[in-house]
Image (spheres, helix red, strand yellow):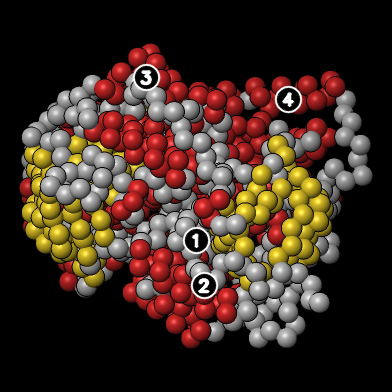
Amino acid sequence: MTNPVVHIANLTLQYAGQSILSALDWRVQRGEHWVIGGKSGSGKSSLAKAILGQEKYTGNIQLSFDPNSTLPPLAHYVSSWYRFTNLEGDRNFYYQQRYNKHQGNDTLTVYADLMHFGQKRGLQMQDAEPILEALGFENCRNTQLIELSSGEHKKLQLVQALWLKPQLLIIDEPYTGLDKNSRAQLNAILTQIANQGTTLILITNDNNIPSIMNRFAEIIDGAVREVDSTADFTKDQVRVQKTLPYFLQQAPTVDADTMLELKDVIVRYGEKVVLNKVSWTVKKGEKWLLQGHNGSGKSTLLSLLNGDHPQAYASDIWLFGNKRGSGESIWEIKEKIGIISPELHWYFDTNATVWHAVASGFYDSIGWFLDVKYEEKKQLEQLLDFFDLLPDKNKLLHTLPLGKQRLALLARTIIKNPQLLILDEPCQGLDAAQTAHFNAVVDDLSAHGKTLIYVGHYETQLPNSLSHRLVLEKGEVILSESLLESIAYN
Amino acid sequence: MANYFNTLPLREQLNQLSHAEFMDSSQFADGVNALKGKKIVIVGCGAQGLNQGLNLRDSGLDVSYTLRKEAIEQKRDSWKNATDNNFTVGSYEELIPQADVVINLTPDKQHTSVVNAVMPLMKQGATLSYSHGFNIVEEGMQIRKDITVIMVAPKCPGSEVRAEYLRGFGVPTLIAVHPENDPEGKGWPYAKAYCVGTGGHRAGVLKSSFVAEVKSDLMGEQTILCGLLQTGSILSFDKMVEKGIDAGYASKLVQYGVEVITEALKHGGVSGMLDRLSNPAKIKAYQVSEELKDIMRPLFQKHQDDIMSGEFSKTMMEDWANGDANLLKWRAETGETAFEKTPAGDVKIAEQEYFDNYLLMVAFVRAGVELAFETMVEAGIKPESAYYESLHETPLIANTIARKKLFEMNRVISDTAEYGCYLFDQACKPLLTDFMKKVDTDLVGKNFNEGKDGSVDNTQLVQVNEILRNHQVEVVGRTLRKAMTAMKTIKTV
């Protein structure tokens, strides 16, 4: 009988003085492909990192590779959170950097990064090509890392993982940021490599997984507990919906009936057209859903609205009744907008405490602020309580599970009761219960006079209050419609 | 043109040198209003030019760029930088005559030719801005009397000026008005508004003078910032190799160590940096740095004297006239040092290890920061100015070494700084020959604490702590750092 691929005995792991895994035993046999699900913060990622030796633990973990396999004897882990560096090891980037054009490139291109990775790991570039294509990533070859969206970053990590052809592949949250097509593409590739002999471990609560996945487990009290299917994963408790703090029930002051208007807006970098003649009007009180595949231009469009994109100065854009570039500062624009995006989270100063991070929403700064006034401090406490974040308020953001970090940044987004909310995939990284809770909050806020732009991939996880939809494809508007007649989105 | 500083009577020299008033954010309540609706034309679109312009435009100001004809015709990088970000770009003739404010952000060396080309085109009563006073103070450039001359000098690389602005903050900034050119009295309102436009008012602003800025800036960059870091790095690497430490390890320790060590300096000053050491190591680092201060003090004083007398700028300008012969020769020599040619090894060095195994650099940095600061203050420069030009900038320069070693540092800094850095390095190494003979691997390469029991004498430790914490650079630093509300960690490792 062959040895199990993964054989764990009596694994104990602590993080910041807290026991995460205790006396955990687990075997992954050849031919098995596991899905690990369950509650956030239960220790799933810690288990994966321990298997790869990236986390300190006590106990015994043994990996056995098949000497007869054509695949290299290698285990690889794709983490859910990843920050790229440039070749000099620099990570000191800010989220709008991709829009500021500067000769002397700041970061590598996707292709150069892959070359570098390939050289380090002894891989052939031609073997990466089919993977790039299979993931629909071939158009990003010459894109700088700084310009990639969160979904595209995920793809880059996946390309590297698949290129290695490891005998054991562990992917933490494989679908974060991926659109419908990309998810299907990924599942097809995972099926293919599993058939070629790779053992898969996916950490996810998603139902839409490859059919070859045949074992399911979650971590309860620090130990692996097997279940029959993804349907049996323990859900986080449905949260008790609290009443929206009084200050957020007030309708914000609105500067103009037409909140924003774009006329034939074109954004291009050299030859590459990112937005092509985009026209869009958002009136006071409308709730828009913005959709499009990875790379369709959604983030660029939003950056024009938030004063983050230099090309806004050359375009016909009206924000809150003022022509863009008529002497307003970007801080006057940001003051009216509450925005969150995966990129903002990505580049956020996570050395801030939860309290500081949320307070910075009053000043649109990233992670710190000038003096907070008494009234604002009261509002802060109310909102932290509303999101159940009070016990965490003095903790550093980066020490919290991703889902909680995201909740804190959502609190930052709404703290100033803005007239326009721009929520770009706000629930990425949240579990189903947190997502339902947050969308209910959005609906609640929507009922109190806010205007909304909501970007979301999955039709199933949207707020109810959406009234309009704009769909982008390759930088062009292919659909702009009212949803008021439709019930499909309820 | 005569050296402006040398034309001044002594009391006026001292008056201008001692110009330093720390301004907090409340003094900037008028925002950018003084420049609202004015036509701002920036000359040059490199790192400072582009990033300052982006900030000014995002603050609601009217910004365009003017470049030399060749740069436009050949579509050079500066032209691409400006046009790719949707700025109007035009020749001097097209844009300067309409400009209310001309901001000169070209390299020092080009200032004379740029100002000579631009000035005749400037309209009556316009304003000319510099971000470094060399041209006015050392070269003695005379500006038409109807023109207002100001300076706004962010104390960070251009990329940081932009990054901090977009995070909602700014970088510490020096502002000044040239007393010979403020005919309408609008110099200060303009300088303040410009500073707000770049976000500088959110990080602490120093009201300075052209003279104080130049004399302190030159001193800082030649000694502690570039010169000493270069000398200390090369000597440390060579010592480790001589003592049989793995060259790859030595290269990595030196390349990244200075960044890790000065990161502690940035947040907690000299005492914060030494607090990262064990008690016995701290006392040792104190003793070593005291010795270093004694050895190097005359060299620091010579640099300050040559800067004050104009001797330094005179020799450097002679080298400019000679096609940069010396500069290029010295640059090539730096590229050939063993440290430069040994790639950092693929070894993991933990953050604390950079302190424990590189005590020598901690001592070098303390000695250099305090010496530069003390020498400047003795020469009549105010502690606030001296702080920015010594302690404040050290981590920024260390970051360039971490990126790509000394060659990169010398590429990023100005030619003026680079020239002064080589002068210092060449004089400093022989001074330290005897000292370095005594240095062993407990100071550089191996953990100082190894084989020691960690005990110290109470009185001695208290004395050392007191001396460190009560140094003037620490006292003034505590106040100034408070204004930099949002210091971000720069991390390469």
The x and y percentages for residue B305 are 52, 40
Look at label 2 and name its amino acid.
Answer: Leu
Q: CA distance from mark 3 to mark 4?
A: 43 Å
Secondary structure category for the residue under label 4: helix
Q: Is residue A349 left or right of residue A322?
A: right
Q: Do badges 1 and 3 share one subunit?
A: yes
**First in sequence: mark 2 or mark 1?**
1
Can you tell which mark lies on residue A379?
Answer: 3
What is the C-alpha distance between the residues marked 3 and 2?
Answer: 47 Å
Q: For mark 1, does the 10 Å Cα neighbourhood hold few (<14), some (14 to 19), or many (20 or more) residues?
A: many
Which chain is mark 3 on?
A
Three-letter amino acid code at the position of disc 3: Gln
Q: Residue at left 20%, top 24%?
A: A251
Comes first in the chain, label 1 or label 3: 1
One can see residue A191 in this view: yes
Indicate whether A137 appears above or below A148: below
Residue A406 visible from this viewpoint: no
Q: Dot 1 corresponds to which residue?
A: A174
Q: Mark 1 or mark 4, which is nearer to you? A: 1
Residue A190 tag number = 2
Q: Nearer the viewer, residue B253 or A457?
A: A457
Figure quadrant of the C terminus of chain B: bottom right
Q: Amino acid at mark 4?
A: Asn
Give the CA distance from mark 1 to mark 4. 52 Å
Q: CA distance from mark 4 to mark 2?
A: 60 Å
Q: Is residue B371 above or below residue A431?
A: above
